[in-house]
Image (cartoon, coloured by chain):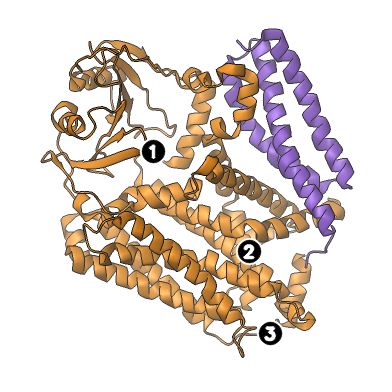
Amino acid sequence: MKSGLRHSMDYLHTWAGVLFSVLLFLVFFMGTLSVFDREIDRWMMPDTRVPQPEAVSFDRIALPHLRQLAPDSRQWLVQYPSPRDPVMRVGWNDGKEFKTRQVDVNTGRLLPEAGSKGGTGFFFPFHYSFHIKWNDVGYWLLAIVSIAMLILLVSGVIIHKKIFADFFTFRPGKSTQRATLDVHNVSSVLLLPFHFIITLSGLIIFVFIYMKPGISLMYGSEAGKVSQEAFGQVIRAPAKQAGELASVDAMVAQAQALWGSGGVRRVSVRNPQDRNATVEIQRRPHDQVAYETHTVTFDGATGAVLHRQNVSAAMTVQRFFSGLHMIPFDHWWLRWMYFAMGLVSCVMIGTGLLLWVEKRRVRQEKEGRISYRIVNAVAAAGCMGTLVATLSMLVANKLLPAGLPGRAALEQWIFFAVWLGALIHPLARTWQPPHCTDTRIAWREQAWAGALLAVLAVAMNAVVTGDHLLRTLDRGTLAVAGTDLVLLVAAAFAAITARRLSARPAAISPEATSMMKAAA
Amino acid sequence: MSKPRFSWQSALTRALIGALGGFVLAISFMMGTAGTLTASGLLTRADAVVIAGMLAFLVWATAVLVAFGAATAMRAAAWVLGSATGFALLGWGSIALVGNA
């Protein structure tokens, strides 16, 4: 391979890494949490810790609530309970925004406002939109970050002279920097297929957003038709005459008979009070990788089948990649593997940033430059600070009084406020003599803060909800028990990291310098 | 230590060629490929758009790599924008052949 290309790719890898690592860390960290977003919901919304329902009825449970909550809405959406989510979610568009409430199917009772966005309302949207809704800026930021990830992966492979050897190289007993490089290399090489597929599939999910200009060129003025054609949707205009909805439970039974097996994921009713109402029933894709819902559309007034979705081979490929990314299937081992691989990705990104800082620390100090300190502060806030902000949000979830107006938004703002604090903290440490050259102080202090907050979150959950670990394990409330256990493991890891960072800060050894030269 | 191969002006130019030019290339690739697949009758319009759209992400990423791998920024621009023009012409021709229907 030409050394010129390798140097170009090294340059690209280094600087794209520095510029995008924090955003990439955010995407991967929030994506990792989203693997268990429903379980985090159970932890953050104690009212939803209800038993799995035996049977679900739209007509008896969802319909009365929707008629009361949203009589004039043009669309009702009802998310059926699943093994990961025992409550029913009823949702409607009130003309301005989409609203949801949760229902305990066992009692038919509408649960009080959750007062929390939970995993599905905060961590998951953060993963794909950064909570920036204006003009789809969040989605486009994600596209740029994802393309950056793809080029980081390819350029990372090109600059590796010894990719096979790096696969087996880990020297934790050596200098911190050598160990950091080894962790970065091993985590990158070992999970290269995962990194590549998860990034590409993330882009493919939003193909209809990112490729909108191309779609407009292909479809001309009919660009809106593409999703109708691709997904085989049936959309009827309202007749503007009052109509009565036939039994949706009967339609569900009919859809299940057509599918042969499987439960309902979601029921969507368009123009529910109109004679031209339609009811779309989606199958829960629990037994397949592809996010394929086999939607059956019924005439709302008569209950007759209007359309049975049968997506094309091309769309099946798109749905397969979507499923590969979003894990709709029931498979706990694979779900945990995704979680573990997501964490390894976070480690890969974090260690990459640390390498950049460590490589420049001594040289820049000699030259009187401080850019490495700023990058270190941003890296600390972006990696450890994100963890601290997340844990602060979980603690706030237990401390804020129930029924507090704007409680869910307040939780969210606590996350952002702590995150901002996590940026100010390392910046302040950076300019605080005499340890301003020790880049590890801020990381260490934030790691301790993370460890304490994680333990505090578990303790607060036990005190406030009464669902301590022994009880949840005994009762089989595994969503809550699992979240508590992961928090305790995170606390242990944070404490170990903090202790390791407490070791004497060292100047770069000659051995590490020669190793860096070799790596470059 | 990575050698500072590019000046910041060159790096910025290449980044713009890769990111913006790459996106233009991806869109024109999508149009050219989807148009050709539709015109040849191999796929329906929606299927062709989905298949070409998925592949276009790889084209976009490749454009960034080409932008930084090329010997000069001018050559990078020529590669990326030249390919974009080629695909755009292909797409324009095939769409003109079958229309937007």
For residue A177, which quarter of the picture? bottom right
At a point 61% along the width and 77% down the height, the residue shown is A176
Single out the residue that lies furthest toward the left: A107
Element under label 3? loop
In the depicted view, which residue is nearer to us: A99 or A167? Answer: A99
Do circles 2 and 3 both sit on a common chain? yes
At a point 60% along the width and 46% down the height, the residue shown is A146
Circles 1 and 3, Cβ within 8 Å, touching? The answer is no
In the depicted view, which residue is nearer to us: A23 or A237? Answer: A237
Give the colour chain B carries in the figure: purple
Q: Name the spot of residue A265 as percent of width and height, x first.
A: 30, 32
Q: Name the spot of residue A169 as percent of width and height, x first.
A: 63, 65
Q: Name the residue under label 2.
A: A352
Q: Name the residue under label 3.
A: A507
Single out the residue that lies furthest toward the bottom: A434
Q: Name the spot of residue B98 as percent of width and height, x first.
A: 67, 8
**Amino acid carrying mark 2 in the image:** Gly
Element under label 1? loop
Tell which circle, 1 or 3, labels the residue nearer the N-terminal end.
1
Q: What chain does badge 2 belong to?
A: A
Query: How much space separates mark 2 and mark 3, taking CA atoms?
Result: 19 Å
Q: Mark 1 points at which residue?
A: A328
The orange one among the chains is: A
Tell which circle, 2 or 3, labels the residue nearer the N-terminal end.
2
At a point 45% along the width and 62% down the height, the residue shown is A416
